[in-house]
Image (cartoon, helix red, strand yellow):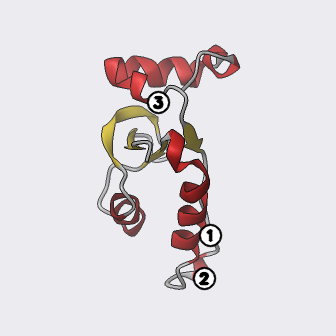
Amino acid sequence: MGKGEEQKYPWAFELQSRLGGASTELESTFALNLLARDPKQRQRGLGRRTLETWISEVGRFGCWLQTDDIDSPARRLYEELGFTELGHGPEAPSGHPGLVMFRSPR
């Protein structure tokens, strides 16, 4: 989460407010805004390969995403790929605060 244009959006202010001091971890990193796949393509590894490719390109800067705060295959994948819980951000589509997961620069 940089200091540029994105800071002008209410969502960015809410993210920073909810994360507090932990929000500094997001500075100069990349955010994954949406990763989705066709439900008919489950269990083929497409999501994993897509995420691994993205991480291979941006991982040296650090990266983060927001997901539902539930035990799910997606969340387990993020954890397997080195993402850790940073805190809760703005509401997810479920209506509950989303879980922000961060992967340190490598």
Q: Can you say whether 38 is above or below 21 in the image? A: below
Which residue is denoted by mark 2 in the rendering? Answer: 41
Q: What element carries label 3?
A: helix
Give the percent coordinates (x, y) of residue 60.
51, 45
Residue 26 disc label: 3
Q: Is mark 1 on a helix, strand or loop?
A: loop
Q: Between 85 and 29, which is closer to the camera in this rendering?
A: 29
Label 3 crowd (10 A; few <14 / some 14-19 / many >=20) = many
Q: Can you say whether 53 is above or below 28 in the image? A: below
Which residue is denoted by mark 1 in the rendering? Answer: 37
Q: Can you say whether 6 is above or below 69 in the image? A: above
Q: How far apart are marks 2 and 1 (CA)?
A: 7 Å
Give the percent coordinates (x, y) of residue 18.
37, 23
Name the residue: 44% across, 20% down.
16
Mark 2 or 3: the one toward you: 3
Give the percent coordinates (x, y) of residue 79.
33, 58
Name the residue: 56% across, 72% down.
49
Compared across the picture, whether 78 is left or right of 40 comes to: left
For badge 1, the amino acid type reads: Arg
Q: Of all residues shown, which one is farthest toward the right?
A: 5
Q: Which tag, 1 or 3, sits closer to the chain's start? A: 3
Give the percent coordinates (x, y) of residue 23.
40, 24
For badge 3, the amino acid type reads: Leu
For badge 2, the amino acid type reads: Gln
Instruction: Say if mark 2 contacts mark 1, CB within 8 Å.
Output: yes
Q: Between 28 and 4, which is closer to the camera in this rendering?
A: 28
Label 1 crowd (10 A; few <14 / some 14-19 / many >=20) = few
